[in-house]
Amino acid sequence: MMRVQWQRLWSKWMVAALAMVALPAAAELRVFACEPEWAALAAALGGDRVSVDTATTAAQDPHYVQARPGLIALVRRADLLVCTGADLEAGWLPLLLRKSGNSAIQPGRPGHFLAAEQVRLLAVPERLDRALGDIHAAGNPHLALDPRRLLSVAERLAERMAAIDPEHAAAYRERLAGFRNRWQAAISRWEAQAAPLRGRRVAVHHPTFTYLEAWLGLERVAMLEPRPGVPPSSGHLAELLEKLRAEPVDLILHASHENARPAGWLAGKIGVPALALPASPGGSPGVGTLESWMDALVADLLHAIGAEG
Ligand SMILES: [Zn+2]
């Protein structure tokens, strides 16, 4: 008798619990994305099923964001949080999560999706050493700049959306299939266009474009920041100037949102172009989608080495 009652109670509780987590059929899935690339990806996979809010623009440095009340309000009402992880948002996301009071998107819940947990990261240090100011102590977080890794993230994100909004699971998978076809064709196109970049030597301000360099075969020989996140001192720049005079580079790269002056100074001294690239979609007119962003990155690099068309 006791046992039957307990089972009834249990199944009643399960029905209630499921009703609490499953999204009402008519409601849209509310996505909070930390960076524009994940907002663009969620919109591409979700179509009119999702509404997407973004914490940052391409003009901002995603390492340093203020956890302002407007962002807390957006996290509070989100069904799914899509961020980079690997410490990129370590300075602001934990506070947003804590202040949101939203249990659905806390770490470990289905509503908490980190891109860095879906792929293998580059530049994972053998030992954690934040004491020296390294803000990439969990590995390089700028993984969206490798379109092959971005596709792996898309596959996992579509599954996550289907799990949270099971009524529309088929639609998410269908959109993923369309995205995969377009994206794989685009990857082949970019790789063919970018062939002249292979083996070109670059110096970079911050390791923002590590994944892009690895994908396209650019060879990074110097970094203006002595450690990721530590601004270049004049002493460090003077040393780099000597190094780059002895071992020339073709280009000095920095993200459009990063301080352009150290790269500009060094480029002027050694007589090579300093190139500002958008680290996220939406950084300049006409590069609002993932595809047009990647198109612009490849075209800008080719133009800078005088190899376009
Ligand atoms: Zn970084």
Image: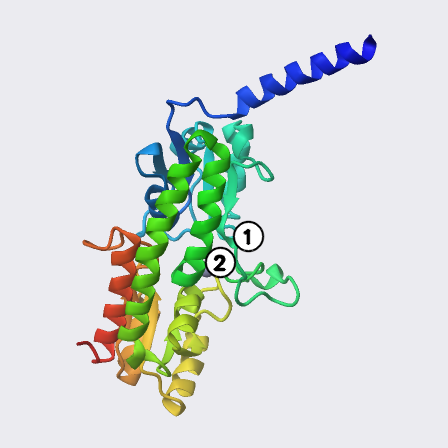
The residue positioned farthest toward the bottom in the image shown: 246
Image quadrant holding the C terminus, namely bottom left
Q: Residue at x 33, y 42 (%)?
A: 43
Q: Residue at x 25, y 57 (%)?
A: 292
The label number, if any, that marks residue 78 in the structure image: none
- Name the amino acid type tagged 1: Glu
Name the front one of labels 1 and 2: 1
57 relative position to 98: left or right: left
Residues tagged 1 and 2 counted as in contact (Cβ below 8 A): no
Q: Quick check: can you spot residue 299? A: yes
Residue on which the image places disc 1: 117
Crowding at dot 2, Cα within 10 Å, few <14 / some 14-19 / many 20+, comes out as: many
Q: Position of residue 275 (x, y in %)?
A: 28, 70
Q: Residue at x 82, y 9 (%)?
A: 2
Of residue 3 and residue 89, the one placed in the foreground of this image is: 3
Q: Position of residue 193 (x, y in %)?
A: 26, 74
Would you say the beta carbon of the disc 2 residue lies within 8 angstroms of ligand 1? yes
Q: Secondary structure at mark 1?
A: helix
Q: Position of residue 120 (x, y in %)?
A: 54, 61
2 relative position to 50: left or right: right
Residue on which the image places disc 2: 141
Of residue 72 and residue 161, the one placed in the foreground of this image is: 161
Q: Where on the picture, by quarter, is residue 267?
A: bottom left
Crowding at dot 1, Cα within 10 Å, few <14 / some 14-19 / many 20+, comes out as: few
Q: Residue at x 47, y 32 (%)?
A: 166
- Name the amino acid type tagged 2: Pro
